[in-house]
Image (cartoon, helix red, strand yellow):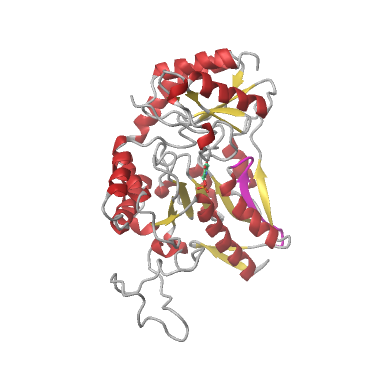
Amino acid sequence: MVEHETAAPGYNDDDESPRSQCSASRSSSRVVYLNNAGQARLSDAAKRAGIHALTSPILPYADVDLRKIRNLFATVIGATEADVCIHPSTAFSITMAAENIFRRHVENGSGATRRVGDVEATTTTQPGRIIVLEDQMCSAVYGWQDIVQRSKGTLKLDIVPFPSPDACASWTDLILERLEGNVVACCLPPLHWSDGSLIDLVRVGDVCRAKSVPLIVDSTQATGIMECDVKRIQPTLMACSVHKWLRSCSGASLVYVHPSVRDEWQPLDQHGRGRDFGTPAYDASKDEMSDDGYPTTFFKDARKFDSGGKPNPVLLPILRASLEEIVTLDIEEAQQQLRALMSPFLEWATRHGYTFPTSHAHHLVGIRPTSQASTEKMIAIAERLESAHNVCIAVRCGAFRISPYLDCTPSDMDRLVQALEQEALHL
Ligand SMILES: Cc1ncc(COP(=O)(O)O)c(C=O)c1O
């Protein structure tokens, strides 16, 4: 098995930092990489695709890859190529959704009839609520925060807290309870990024549709390793950054946009890439400009929402190669494999006083010490795991987040247990 560079344990977002990358020279043992929720390791095929792009005499033109990527991603999420656009980040996609919902909210004002997707609904004079989760990843929250601030009190965040450990109701139930009254949008992930708590988006989607509330999904920690079928969830928008379970480098988010908002919604930035000039032939825009400027007609499909800027010709071949592998995965089997891998570890964690969500994914689980350990201490432990044991995990929202991929072995999990037994004994 190849040694890989690994990710930072203690960061508040999931960015990589060269400062904290594991160095194989620190220990001769194989790196146990359990931070795939931070940054995926590239498969050999994905690396080859990147190297091939970089070493080509001229950087390849990205259009062929773009088309294929839309198609492959659509296959993974049960959509069609026409539903998929490409953004630089999930924050970009969520901001686009927020801006469109803001436009609709401000245009119509309180008491007016608003139209979301296919269903009509009547707004009230209550502030419109935007449902998010406690400690949800910030890329899925800032866009809403911004429109709330600009709304002069007509919008507010409605943050659904983590269920208390002794609560009977699941997090999904708590969300459904909030889906009453004037809800303007619901922005949720299929699972919490810190501990893997599952949210049943099919149930939430059903209620959102019945109440005409747009469901905006950040599926970054799910798509590629867990079922995220848009035919079942029916979100208005679902965005997925590509550097986790889509097994690519960072720099893009693949985005599903429901056909019902294609006409009404606007892209976030203004440029020519989402426009239909009637011909693919590029002629430097000659003769296209009138007194009003350039032609404005958008593509009829989700390419309308593509972000501007030339697509990255190195990232795209890597992403394409990764997606070509992901479409061959049996997601159900993958989750079963990871469940079998994680079970003995979670039994160990329970015996040693850690807690974790009752209903959790198998590719990402956060274990919390029952005693109140400081974040600093937990980060220091994770750093020791990395520097002294070559075991890479992350600390997120008070939990040690363990996120294996399908190449992890039971002996990797044994190494994690041994390292925690040595370094976290007195937590
Ligand atoms: C749940 C979740 N969403 C989104 C992202 C990435 O967002 P962005 O593409 O805006 O950096 C991450 C991690 O980086 C994440 O954990």
Say whether residue 208 is visible.
yes
Q: Is residue 1 left or right of residue 266?
A: left
Residue 141 image position (x, y, % from top left): 60, 49
276 in relation to 191, above or below? below
Q: If the image is split into quadrants, where does the N terminus sit?
A: top left
Residue 412 image position (x, y, % from top left): 42, 19
Residue 305 image position (x, y, % from top left): 44, 62
Image quadrant where residue 153 sits: bottom right
Say whether residue 166 is visible.
no
Q: Residue furthest right?
A: 153
Residue 128 counted in the magenta span: yes
Instruction: Please give the name of the residue rendered at 49% of the width and 33% of the height, measured from the top-left corner.
Output: 7
Image quadrant where residue 165 sits: top right
Instruction: Please give the name of the residue rendered at 29% of the width and 47% of the height, measured from the top-left corner.
Output: 55
Q: Residue furthest left?
A: 57
The segment highlighted magenta reads: 125-136
Q: Residue furthest bottom?
A: 291
301 in relation to 194, above or below? below
